[in-house]
Image: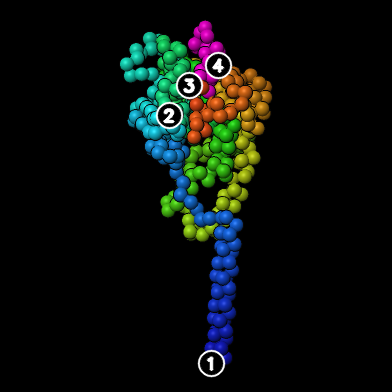
Amino acid sequence: MGSSRKKATGRFAAITISLVSLIFSLAAAELVMRAMGHTPLQPRTLTGDGSRTETPIMTEKHPSLGWVNKPGTYNYPGFSADIESITVTVLPDRGRRTMATDSPLPTTQDKLILVGGSYIQGYAISDQETLAWKLQRQFPDVSVRNLGVPGYGTFQSLLTLEDVLPDIDGGKTIFYGYIGHHQMRNVLHFGWLEMFTRVGEPSYFPPYATIGEDGNLMRYPVSSSNNWPFRDSLALVNKAERAWLRYLSQSRADKHEAVTEKIVVEMQNLAESQGAKFVVLLLLDTDSYTPDFIRFLDANDLDYLNCSPPVFGPEYRVVGEGHPNNELNSIWEQCITNYLQPGVTR
């Protein structure tokens, strides 16, 4: 009996020593991580919902698109002393306003439909400074719809078109505003995935796509997941989960170019099925992704316009914020106008 007690006591002591050693090791590792600048999970906000200065919440969750523009009129301070205020008007159809409320309605059924992310939507500038507003002013007999949503990539733009096109009659010309960042958004790259992690609540991830073994596009819906325990209190756990998520997302991230190309082809096919013309609008060609993308467009005889400025310098950015300003939107409008004249749909 005494021997059994001694063995049990010895095992307990060994376990206790092991646990204490483990705790001290983890504590030491946590201190090292903090000393190296790593932190627990920090609070984040969704794109365009108050993450910058006094920007109001202008988006809301959506079960299939991830998020959409939230109808309403928003007035908030500008990002510099040069701009007193910014006005954003989101219509009941979740598109951004493209004309003054007292303007006469277009007299034809022709429509220009703009889809894309924050550059198309006109983030950080007022309604009348946006590309869509300028096009509506240039073509008063055509209905211009601005369906851009901050944070969208090519895939969410495709989903938007699938949702709205069947209900839009008349002649239609669709412009998808492309920038290189969209390729990583399309596959939910780790760097984009991290934008949606939340402290104290499940992370809410947007839809994304990848390529299946058969070479076809595979679609993944909106999803959510809980963070690892203690990620918002321990830098060590935060670092470990980030490494794990990076590993899981790497295989699809490697396919970002092929995925984007597949999505664009589906956009083209969708437009044709709805009797619409589809045009890829290159808003910036200064990133490393665009040259290969242009070669793809050329090789597949896809219609596109390169409306990029020579350099996306400070003269084309909203002061204090960085998004395209009124001047760059005017350049884009002139580029499209030159393409459309003398006929709007063709």
Judging by the rendered image, the residue that carries numbered circle 4 is: 335
Say which residue appears at 58% left-offset and 37% top-offset. 184
Question: Residue 12 occupies which quadrant of the picture?
Answer: bottom right
Q: Residue furthest bottom?
A: 2
Compare residues 94 and 336 and report the one nearer the observer. Answer: 336
> Which is nearer the N-term, disc 1 or disc 2?
1
Residue 107 appears left or right of 3:
left
Q: What residue is shown with label 2? A: 83
> Which one is closest to the eye, mark 3 or mark 1?
3
The answer to which of 182 and 48 lies nearer the viewer is 48
- Taking the magenta stretch, the answer to whether it contains residue 194 is no
Of the numbered discs 4 and 1, the one sitting upstream in the chain is 1
Q: Residue 18, image x and y in percent?
A: 58, 75
What colour scheme has been applied to the protein in the rendered image? rainbow
Give the spatial CA distance, label 2 vs label 4. Answer: 26 Å
Cα distance, mark 3 to mark 1? 87 Å
- In the picture shown, does residue 61 fall above or below 278? below
Range of the magenta residues? Answer: 328-345
Picture quadrant where residue 303 is located = top right
Mark 1 in CB contact with mark 2 (< 8 angstroms): no
**Front disc: 2 or 4:** 2
| SS label for mark 1 | loop
Q: Using the numbered discs, state the Cα–Cα distance from disc 4 to disc 3 in whole angstroms.
A: 11 Å
Give the crowd class for mark 3: few <14, some 14-19, many >=20 residues within 10 Å.
many
* Marks 2/3: CA–CA distance: 18 Å
Residue highlighted by disc 1: 1
- According to the image, label 3 marks what residue? 131
Residue type (three-letter) at the residue carrying disc 3: Leu
